Amino acid sequence: MIDFEDVPLLRDPIMIAAFEGWNDAGETASATVAHLIETWGATPLAALDPELYYDFQVNRPRITSDSGRREIVWPTTKIFLAQETPLDRDVILVQGIEPSMKWRAFTEELMDFAADCEVGMIITLGGLLADVPHTRPIPVTVTSEHEETRQRYDVEPNRYEGPTGIVGVVSDAAHQADIPTLSCWAAVPHYAGAGPSPKATLALLTRLEALFDTLIGHADLQEQARAWEHGVDELAASDDEVADYVHSLEQTQDTTELPEASGDAIAREFEKYLRRRDTDD
């Protein structure tokens, strides 16, 4: 762990983590954490040593220039602290990239940091591609492995079985360390998941507000979400096959139980996504 600042005395801190890559369809989760960092004026605390966890041919460093000074920025996972939040508690924000190697050591470092800070809850964020229409509210499912946490926030246990990403590994490690966890996933329309999905980010942010009964602030996310939906509308209008498919998804969602009401539904969507991924590969 590379320390930037000494950790001050914290007020009942929670940790919110998101990772770019396999867990981040539509850049939903990473954009949510970036929004929280900006909105709450979070300051950098530490970073994980990128040399240990990343393949730089997969996640390449970038050269930046500031006032004529050139610098190499290495891909890594950074940890921020937000103390000016509406939650009456401090928030540690993990803005990461799914590691290329040594997942257990990576996760152990995060858990050690959480233990040192006496983190009382860990919330992981994710985005998955699913058979949902872009014209309807984005489904967000929240699960927990901790019985008291499920009762407190009225959420379901996670019944998903199959391949997992670093989000699943971190959630499991937190559970094994007896740290209460929440796992929040937004379902992104798979036919519109190639780029950022601000509508899904807004849905994830709104779900966090509901969980903690507070307002976080949306900045221009609502305008971005409307622009995104309009852009996908134009895409669908230009292709009869896509338009028919979207209409069928709308009918299905309008006449059956909403996917966000069931963790099993999201698990099924995740399995469909994995099957599509295998087919594409």
Image (cartoon, helix red, strand yellow):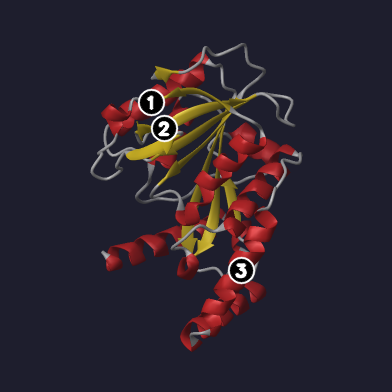
Q: Residue at the spot x=39%, y=48% of the render?
A: 21
| Residue at image mark 3 | 229
Mark 1 residue element: loop
For disc 3, the neighbor class at 10 Å (few under 14, some 14 to 19, many from 20) is some
Asked whether 119 or 228 is in front, the reply is 228
Q: Amino acid at mark 1?
A: Leu
- What is the CA distance from the residue labelled 1 to the residue labelled 2? 6 Å
Q: Residue at x 29, y 32 (%)?
A: 53
Between 75 and 118, the one lying in front of the other is 75
Which residue is at 76% across, 39% downward?
A: 214
Confirm or deny contact between disc 1 and disc 2 (CB under 8 A): yes
Q: Is residue 66 left or right of residue 217?
A: left
In this rendering, the answer to whether 66 lies above or below 193 is above
* Rendered image: mark on residue 77: 2
Q: In the rendering, at what x and y percent does residue 196 appear?
A: 50, 57
Instruction: Pinpoint residue 49: horizontal percent, then vertical percent.
Output: 34, 25
- Which quarter of the rendering shows the C terminus? bottom left
Tell me if residue 41 can be seen: yes
Whole-number angstrom distance, CA of label 1 to CA of label 3? 36 Å
Q: Is residue 137 visible?
A: no
Residue in the foreground of this view, choosing between 267 and 41: 41
Amino acid carrying mark 2 in the image: Thr
Q: Which mark is residue 65?
A: none
Query: Which residue is depicted at the point 41% across and 65% down?
Result: 272
Amino acid type of the residue that numbered disc 3 sits on in the rendered structure: Glu
Marked residue nearer the N-terminal end (2 or 3) = 2
Q: Which residue is mark 1?
A: 48
Residue 280 x %, y %: 29, 67
First in sequence: mark 1 vs mark 2: 1
Pointer 1 local density, CA inside 10 Å: few below 14, some 14–19, many at least 20: some
Left-right relation of 181 to 86: left
